[in-house]
Structures are given as C-alpha cells and as structure tokens.
Image (cartoon, grey):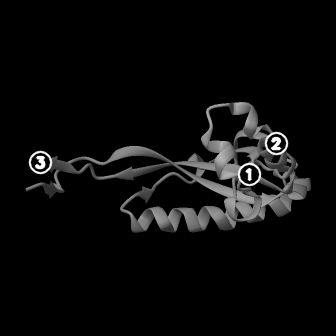
Amino acid sequence: MTELIVAKDFTKVPVRKRGIVTVPGEMAKFACQGARLRDFPLPHRQLQLVFQDAAQRFISQQAKRGYEYWDRDSLLVWGPYPSYEFQKTALHGDEEALRKDDPRLAVPYAKKRAASIGEFADYLLVGTFVAVPVVVES
C-alpha cells in the first residue's frame, strides 16, 4: 500500500508554476518575455488589469493546492502566443481522412485552424511558489 508522508521538519522548496491567460486578439499588443506586472507601459494598462486579476486567481488556486506565494516580484508574464482555447477555436476534421497515414490530408484542417488563431492570444504567468516536499513510500 502506498503511503503519503508529509513531514513538518522538511524545509520548504521553491517550485515554478505557470498559468495561461487567454485574452482577445485586439488586446494582445504587448510583446513581453518575462516582464513583471508592475513594469507594463501605460498604453497597455487594460491588459495589465486583466493580468492582475488573473494573477490573484492563480495565486489563490495554487494556495488551495498547498503552494505558498512568497515573492510579489517573482510573477512574470510571457507572450503573446497563438491561443489554444479549444471551446472557441478548435475545428474537427474528417475522421476517416485523419486516420490515414498521409499527413497531406490534414493540410486543409491546419489552414482553417491557422486562420482562426488571430481572434485570441495566450500569455503565460510564471511564478515562484514554495511548498513542503512530500515523500511517497510504497
């Protein structure tokens, strides 16, 4: 039988966690590679407010999972990237054409998918959290 043991005498370890924020394409005009939320330029204030709200929800979700957010400046934003919000952009291809080994049969579906990407964009929120390590024994 597998047992989970959480020992209080273990020190906390840093863990990098990431979350994905999907925004409308017309809002995704700020290209950033590891920008802090407080360092957004003034013309992108609306996008900054969206990220601050998403960051609070991200931090609270990680707290429920046992990760403690300890450094306010460690939350960084990366993006924009093409969105993979499947509820709005996914297209289903012909099942029989996609089962065959010839990848050329999937080209029309890939072109339709590429045309629909511009409607939304994804940004990554990456932060450093701390957690107590869990030892698993069998």
- Within 10 Å of disc 2 (Cα), the crowding (few <14, some 14-19, many 20+) is few
Q: Earlier in the sequence, mark 1 or mark 2?
A: 1
Mark before the other along the chain sequence, 3 or 2:
2
> Disc 3 or disc 2, which is closer to the eye?
2
Q: Is residue 100 above or below residue 113?
A: above
Answer few, some or many: residues within 10 Å of disc 1's Cα (few below 14, many 20 plus, some between 14 and 19): many
Q: Gap in Å between the C-alphas at discs 1 and 2? A: 19 Å
- Numbered disc in front, either 1 or 2: 2
Residue type, mark 3 in image: Glu
Q: Position of residue 104 (x, y in %)?
A: 75, 32
Nearer the observer, disc 3 or disc 1?
A: 1
**Residue pictured at 79% horizontal, 50% vertical:** 40
Q: Secondary structure at mark 2?
A: helix
Which element carries disc 3, helix, strand or loop? strand
Q: Position of residue 97 (x, y in %)?
A: 69, 44
Q: Amino acid at mark 1?
A: Ser
- Please name whichever residue, 88 or 25, is drawn nearer the observer in this view of the structure: 88
Image-based side of 97 in relation to 58, left or right = right
* The label number, if any, that marks residue 83 in the structure image: 1
Crowd rating for badge 3 (residues with CA inside 10 Å; few <14, some 14–19, many 20+)? few
Residue bearing the label numbered 2: 108
What distance separates the C-alpha of mark 3 from that of mark 2?
A: 50 Å
- Look at the image and tell me whether residue 77 can be seen: no
SS type, badge 1? loop
The amino acid type of the residue labelled 2 equals Pro
Q: Position of residue 112 (x, y in %)?
A: 83, 48
Q: Are marks 3 and 1 in contact (CB under 8 Å)?
A: no
The reply to whether residue 96 is visible in this rendering is yes
The circle drawn on residue 137 is 3
In the rendered view, does 73 fall on the left or right side of 40?
Answer: left
Q: Which residue is at the front of the view, 47 or 37?
A: 47
Nearest to the observer: residue 93 or residue 9? 93
